Amino acid sequence: MIKIFKRKSDKKEYYVSSAPKYKTTLGDVIFNILNYTFFIVFTIACIFPFYYLLINTISDNDLVRKGAITFIPKGIHFKNYISLKSVGDLMQSFKVTVARTVIGTGLMVGASGLVGFLVTKQEMWGRSFWYRFIIITMYFNAGLVPWYLNMAMLGLTDNFLGYIIPGIVAPYNIILVKTYIESIPAELEESAYIDGASYFKVFLKIIWPLSKPILATIAIFGAVGNWNSFQDSLIIMQNDASLYTLQHRLYMYLNQTTNIGQVMKSANTKLSASTQAALLNAKTIKYTISMVTVIPILLVYPFMQRYFEKGIMLGAVKG
Amino acid sequence: MHSNEAKKATKKHSIEMIFYLYRFSIILLVISLFMPSLNPGRITSLINENMSLFTSGISYSSLISNTLRSINLGWVQGETFKILFIGCMLVCAGVIGAVVGGCTSLGSLKLRRLGNVFAIIGNVISLIGFGTIRAAYSQISMTAYPERVNPEIPIGFYIIMGLIIFILVLSLILLIVQPKPSENDEYELQQKYKLFLLIIPFIALVFVFSYLPLWGWRYAFFDYKAGGTLSKDNYVGFKWFKFLLENKATRNDIVRVLRNTLAMSGLGLATSWCSMAFAILLCEIKQLRIRRFIQTFTTVPNFISWVLVYSFATLIFSSEGIISNIIVARGGIAVNYLLSDQHTWLKMLVWGMWKGIGWSAIVYIAGISGIDQQLYEAATVDGAGRFRKMWHITVPGLLPTYFVLLLLQISGILSNGMEQYLVFENPNNTREIMVLDLYVYKLGIGSGKIPLTTVVGMVKSIVSVTLLLGANKFSKLIRGESLI
């Protein structure tokens, strides 16, 4: 039974047109050339920043400072990555970000799975009301300031839990899981209930394993969201720099060097060697941090891609 | 005989009524845990007035956050706050017992009675907690600086204690009047309630993080400054609403911010067809491998944060970026394009498209693969060329999806998010880049103008919801299907 079900959900490849051949016209050729040119240019525009970032972090620092690096890396070395270890609060931010990504995503996936399962149960007391009660929060919010005051009231500002608890219930993901669970043949569950299994047992032994594709989808998207989080760190962690996320830290480094640059411009004087060294350091540091924050995304990306369409198409089905 | 049964029925009925009252009081009790104005632990004005009993009971560090100075100065003793914390913790712990009682009251007779016992124990613990808080109060009232410390038993102390005593009495009554369970009665709960109890924790989370902030809208009606209090004295009614319209500087700000917001959302709406075009053109590339490759790499930017996008922007367009490097190498002067104030709206649009178009095209690509292939074959037989097939089959096939997404986009016209604009903002372009979300952040969180920004957020939320409902209605009218 399970095998049949799995085969059903196999991915469909794109349809390749097998229509009868027709003559290629001049218009077709011109269109193809323009089309390919457009996509090649756009794809390069998407790839190039990543490439340029990489070669700036591994090229010789002096050459980078002089602006001699354009398209090819020169004097390749990896010292920048090693020197990151000694950059002040960076390790702390890294730990915080990893912790929130792992804990936050784990709890979110568990909660979405359980809630998604529970709301498919017609016999629940007030089921449709509670389902709407959760889902409707996607469409309104009280606004940033009341939200912040609420977090302050709950003692979640300057508190690591402020990253975790508000994200546990994610309405959109609940819709995705619910829609998926509804597509699982009901007989599987029913036979388990007849054998005397409890709801919780059915959830753990049947629903959870069968929903793995959708749970993996929301896990990956949740993890990326947590890894990229910046706004909540900015708003609720104002007084505790040890809780800044990596993106927040990177934002600060980016701003810092801009400011130094502006000071340099306005003062229009020769900078002392130490200031210059600091500036240089800040420049390579910010690019190396950028690279470090982007690497995990690029690593999970191939896995993510498998789930793109599945997630999006399920999302198109309303709750 | 007959009247006896009727009596039994009325008794059962009245027990049910008591249960309703009992559950209702427990819900009230739980909500009051999160109300800062009802915090019984706020026995001195040194304690932050925005802190609820719940916070006081779980986080010692937040409880004492404002009091360190007065402890150091010797106005109050540090021990007092430890006692107070223990008291608050006991009250909170006791409420758990009451909650268990409330939940189990949905079950069988035996389970209900067990729940009553839990509630009684919990309430007694809570009352001990109140005694502890009272002890902390008597210690604090002996301070030598009453005018600084303002020792006072808050009104919430009496309200919550009254509620707890009420629940305690109800539990005792229920324990007495309920019939004894028979021998073969078991602890059981109906399926529908079991499921309900399983989902309750999540409903509570949704309530706390999505509905409770609405309670913060009251700040819009007070003259509130960060760290102050809400009271009759600073109640100002609709002052801030009027201020928004009448104060010239603020009004100009709002008009400018709204213009930016609508302009950038408008540009987004005007170019929303681009992702559909992107998808259609991409599907015209017949080599699957190449198409996959392009799709893969044009989607990546969607998954990096705006901070990283800004990092890329400095890498390319700043005075230390590649363009400046090339200019300098040819003998020119480095230019920081990011600092320019020209075409800000357009630039933001382009960055948004660079980041998002590959991703937003996916839904259309999936839509194209869902179009019936027979249509294309029939068209080919009829002699339709490539472009006519695109225009007459693919585009109409995708229009419903486009329509839905467009309506959703229209309802989100006031919410462009703030991250993109925050990272790209600088003193030169701030006039053009300031959108509503960023404005609220800067003014509310940055400058502490809480009432004013609450008003702005309120109006924004109401307009957005109205737009969404309007779009939904429109969709029902046109397509016969609702959006949400």
Image (spheres, coloured by chain):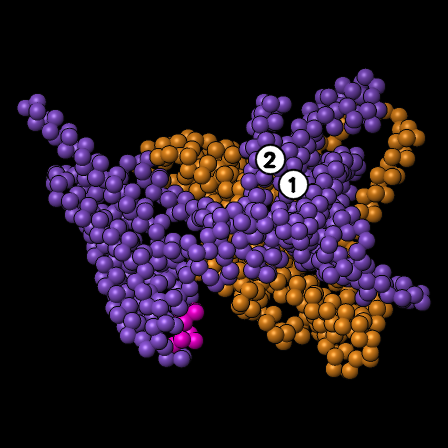
- Taking the magenta stretch, the answer to whether it contains residue A48 is no
Indicate which disc residue B467 carries: 2
For badge 2, the amino acid type reads: Leu
Span colored in magenta? B63-71
Residue at (38% x, 55% y) in the render: B37
For badge 1, the amino acid type reads: Ile
**x, y percentage for residue B61?**
41, 68
Residue A267 lies in quadrant? bottom right
Who's orange, chain-wise? A
Residue B427 visible in this rendered orientation of the protein:
yes
- Which quadrant holds the C terminus of chain B? top right
Image height check: is B212 above or below A249?
above
The answer to whether dots 2 and 1 both sit on one chain is yes
From the viewer's perspective, is B187 left or right of A243? left
Q: What color was chain B assigned in the picture?
A: purple
Q: Which residue is mark 1?
A: B413
Q: Nearer the viewer, residue A216 or B471?
A: B471
